[in-house]
Image (cartoon, helix red, strand yellow):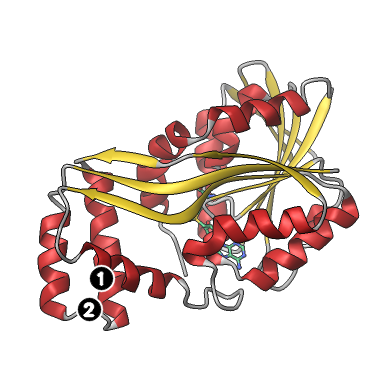
């Protein structure tokens, strides 16, 4: 499954606005006394998570951005250089200077379905945004066990929780959401994807592995606009692929939904710290 840089750029503002402030505060307070922090970002896309967090962390940071998509990693480098106040590069190490922070940038191409251990070395924090709905429960179990062994905290942002509320309501909403969730559970390379169960499953497996959790809701609250329109288009296309809703009904729903007044898409943010 691939994600376009344009789609990630379109959603970045809504993603940053949706973050649960109390969970973020807990993360930033956890590292407040650190002089330096090394963060690994799974499924980094174009680096949105770094742009959201850097100003709130100790001034000396290393970010290891991990994705399997080389195009997204290249876009991340370009976007982060443009975002920085200035950059310096010495002996192949790129450092972003932004608002008083010095951020060493590492870009790693890796298929996290096959191997996630090697990219965790030296990390103080693992983070991921809008990622866990793609993975399977078994993969989350393996990750939780690895994090417990390493006593490594996790900050998981915008994990889909299956709740959607489109306004005004439409007769096909329930059938479409059920089909959308069925599509979400298709294998994205990690086995049967958790999809709408991702947020609950992640919390459960981390608690089982002895982590103390802070959680908060981080829904997208969108009113009519390009993001809502593209979201409706994407959902309708996914539903059509399942064949669970008749083509005519999907077309009618799509037409209504691209003109929806608003929608709320449920997510959970979670900060997990080893006990
Ligand atoms: C929904 S996007 C989120 C991107 C970014 N975190 C953000 O919030 O803008 C999911 C990301 O996971 C990456 N991804 C999916 N499967 C992967 C895999 N097997 N290994 C590494 N990255 C993967 C995608 O390439 C994509 O960048």
Q: Secondary structure at mark 1?
A: helix
Which residue does the image show at 85% across and 52% down from the upper left?
121
Q: Looking at the rendered structure, which numbered label has been put on residue 124?
A: none
Residue 51 image position (x, y, % from top left): 55, 33
Image quarter where ligand 1 lies: bottom right
Q: Nearer the viewer, residue 130 or 81?
A: 130
Q: Looking at the rendered structure, which numbered label has been put on residue 175?
A: 1
Q: Nearer the viewer, residue 70 or 156?
A: 156
Residue 38 image position (x, y, % from top left): 78, 38
Residue position for label 2 = 245
Which residue does the image show at 25% across and 71% down from the upper left?
175
Count how many numbered circles sit on residues in the image: 2
Q: Image height check: is 45 above or below 177? A: above
Residue 42 image position (x, y, % from top left): 65, 53
**Mark 2–mark 1 CB contact (< 8 Å):** yes
Q: Nearer the viewer, residue 250 or 3?
A: 250
For the C terminus, the quadrant is top right
Is tag 2's residue or tag 1's residue first in the polypeptide sequence? 1
């Amino acid at each position: 499954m691939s994600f376009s840089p344009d789609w990630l750029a379109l959603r970045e503002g809504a993603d940053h606005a949706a973050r649960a402030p109390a969970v973020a505060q807990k993360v930033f307070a956890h590292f407040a006394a650190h002089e330096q922090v090394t963060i690994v970002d799974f499924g980094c896309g174009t680096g949105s998570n770094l742009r959201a967090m850097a100003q709130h962390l100790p001034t000396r940071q290393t970010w290891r951005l991990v994705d399997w998509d080389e195009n997204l990693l290249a876009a991340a480098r370009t976007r982060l250089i443009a975002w920085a106040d200035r950059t310096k590069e010495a002996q192949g190490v790129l450092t972003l200077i932004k608002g008083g922070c010095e951020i060493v940038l590492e870009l790693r191409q890796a298929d996290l379905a096959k191997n996630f251990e090697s990219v965790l070395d030296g990390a103080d924090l693992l983070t991921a945004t809008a990622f866990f709905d793609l993975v399977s429960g078994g993969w989350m179990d393996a990750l939780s066990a690895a994090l417990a062994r390493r006593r490594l905290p996790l900050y998981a942002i915008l994990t889909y929780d299956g709740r959607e509320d489109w306004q005004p309501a439409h007769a096909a909403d329930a059938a479409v959401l059920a089909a959308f969730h069925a599509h979400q559970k298709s294998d994205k390379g990690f086995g049967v994807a958790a999809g709408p169960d991702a947020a609950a499953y992640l919390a459960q497996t981390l608690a089982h592995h002895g982590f103390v959790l802070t959680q908060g809701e981080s829904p997208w609250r969108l009113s009519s606009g390009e993001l809502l329109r593209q979201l409706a288009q994407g959902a309708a296309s996914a539903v059509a692929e399942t064949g669970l809703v008749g083509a005519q009904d999907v077309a009618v729903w799509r037409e209504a939904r691209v003109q929806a007044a608003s929608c709320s898409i449920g997510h959970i943010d979670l900060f997990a710290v080893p006990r």
